[in-house]
Image (cartoon, rainbow, N blue to C red):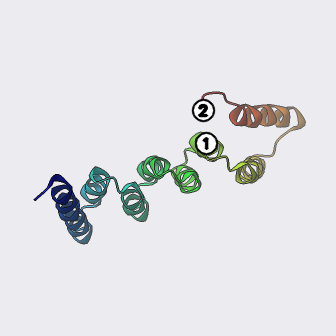
Amino acid sequence: MDLGEGAYQAREIFAIAAQLFEQALFMQKAAETWRAIGQYRKAADVLKAHREYGKAALWYAKVPDFMEAAECHHLAKQYDEAVVAYRKGKHFTELVTYLGEFVILIATIQPIEKADSRIVTRNVLAMVSRQDI
């Protein structure tokens, strides 16, 4: 048996183990096993299906699938991280739409006075223009 064949067999065994963990509802173990063999999307899918949105977002970013990462960050109420994911993926149309919905959401939750709207606008623009990416 050469090294390539051994590595292939190990990945197959890990994949079987991950499926068994999923069937037994050991989702964290299933995700860790998928991650161990570089199957980041499968790891993220398992976590997302079981509402581990923050963790799923991290693995979607490794794929990289920044649209899914942004969605999971949003579902985890990690709004700043959702903005970062949209920016990293260069999904600017979706980013503008997301920020627009975010401002509307804030306005419906708490009516914004004219002075307050400038603060909200400034904060939203600051989120978009962050240079830490």
Name the residue furthest left: 1
Spatial separation of the CA atoms under disc 2 and disc 1? 7 Å
Q: Where, quadrant-wise, is the C terminus in this rendering? A: top right
Label pair 2/1, CB-CB below 8 angstroms? yes
The spot of residue 128 in percent (x, y) is 71, 37
The secondary element bearing badge 2 is classed as: loop
| Residue 13 against residue 102 in the figure, above or below | below
Q: Which of 52 and 92 is in front in this view?
A: 92
Determine crowd level at label 1: few under 14, some 14-19, many 20+ residues with C-alpha closer than 10 A.
Answer: some
SS class of the residue under badge 1? Answer: helix
When asked about the image quadrant of residue 23, the answer is: bottom left
Q: In which quarter of the image is the N terminus?
A: bottom left
Residue at coordinates 32% horizontally, 52% vertically from top-left? 35
Residue to which mark 1 is pinned: 88
Tag shown at residue 133: 2
Q: In which quarter of the image is residue 6?
A: bottom left
Q: Position of residue 119 (x, y in %)?
A: 79, 31
